[in-house]
Amino acid sequence: MSKTVQIALGDVKPLALSILSSFGYGPNHADAIAQMLTTCQLDDCHSHGLFRLFMCIESIKAGKIDGQVEPEISDESTGIVRADARRGMSLLAMEAAIPMLIDKAREHGIAALAINRCFHFSALWPEVERLSNEGLAAMAMVPSHAWVAPAGGTRGTLGTNPLAFSWPRQGTTPFTFDFATSAFARGEIELYKRAGKSLPDGVAIDAEGNPTNDPGAALQGAMLTFGGHKGSALSIMIELMAGPLIDDLTSLESMAYAQGKGGAPYHGEIMLAFDPVRFSGGNRADNDARAERLFADIIDQGARLPSQRRYAARARNLERGYVEIASSLYEDLLALRAWATTRARQKRSGA
Ligand code: NDP
Ligand code: PYC
């Protein structure tokens, strides 16, 4: 980041809330979204922190999302919870459904949550990490829009399709990873464009199908999966598991639904929860110790575990009492809020 500003921890969520409310999100959605953005910003997850307010606002301006609607949660069968977001943002549905998912996982050893008909913009790690803080292992995945070419292909068919996993650890933070199956998340490419930076090789092709390092051309063309055919296959799995399996849209269908109007993709999300108490054959302590030996062997050779950068950022930001974001982002957010406040005043006065 070039020039940055510091935002006191206590000011992050109110900033997000004021922008979301002034653009028409009701208090429950605004709170769930602002909490997610604050959680991500605290861990220096810039591509899915305050920056994602733009996608949330674009979504409401596009006119398809319902900023007020309450989700409906149903106990679908032994191991399945279903949450109908009813064209709202995914996060309120997730909030409302997670307690039932946890209860079912503890009761049966394994349970799944299918969220349907949701707009989705957020990182997945806060969701899986939350389950691990309850002692469960968890996975989550979602499609997005058809921005990503399959390995060997030339046009967007797949989404940026993140996959998140979390494993509970006794007395310390969970082992968690969360990554897009595209080489870069789209949010990351957008941040490169804002910063005027070139992309590394292997991230995207332009609209003519030629490799490009220009983030603008990448956004117009197609993104590439990470790891060639391997990332491509994982991405297809996510399309299937969080799409047809749960009666919801693929990234191609989400893109068609948007009719070019922008905003967050519209689709489903699947989350799986596993209770180690139930799976570990009565040997929980032994199995936890074996997992810890695995982690230790990785760290001993100088490698790091996924999420350690995030946890270090969280500790540092909590200690110093502020987060740091690009000055240009902060100015754009203040301008967005000022615009919405002026518009609201004009509406009240009938101008
Ligand atoms: P990153 O490439 O930033 O990170 C991927 C994962 O790898 C993280 O868990 C990270 O841990 C870990 N990691 C990174 N470097 C190392 C390393 N050297 N050694 C070990 N582990 C490492 O993620 P992406 O840019 O792909 O995704 C960012 C976010 O975007 C995700 O949270 C994802 O959910 C979100 N996203 C959401 C989408 C949606 O549709 N809702 C679509 C696509 C992405 P650490 O954080 O500690 O560095
Ligand atoms: O960064 O790829 C991305 C993304 C898509 C939807 C939300 N984030």
Image (cartoon, rainbow, N blue to C red):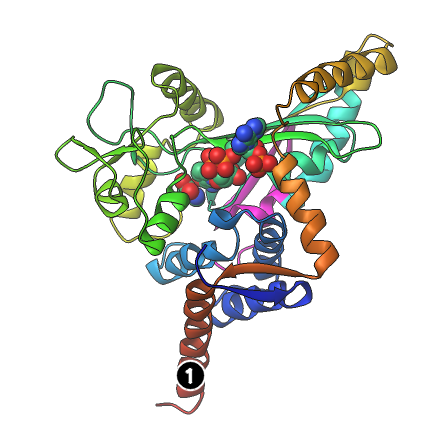
Give residue 130's position: percent from left, percent from top: 70, 38
Q: Nearer the viewer, residue 185 or 120?
A: 185
Q: Nearer the viewer, residue 182 or 141?
A: 182
Write down the residue under mark 1. Answer: 342
- Residue 295 appears left or right of 213: right
Q: Residue furthest top?
A: 281
Residue at coordinates 60% horizontally, 30% vertically from top-left?
306
Where are the magenta residues, as a range? Answer: 67-94
Q: Amino acid at mark 1?
A: Thr
Instruction: Tell me if residue 175 comes above or below residue 220 in the rendering.
Output: above
What secondary structure is found at the residue carrying circle 1? Answer: helix
Residue at coordinates 21% horizontally, 30% vertically from top-left?
155
Instruction: Tell me if residue 310 comes above or below residue 152 in the rendering.
Output: below
Instruction: Reply yes or no: does residue 74 show up in magenta.
Output: yes
* Image quarter hosting the C terminus: bottom left
Residue at coordinates 77% horizontally, 18% vertically from top-left?
292
Which quadrant of the picture is home to ligand 2?
top left
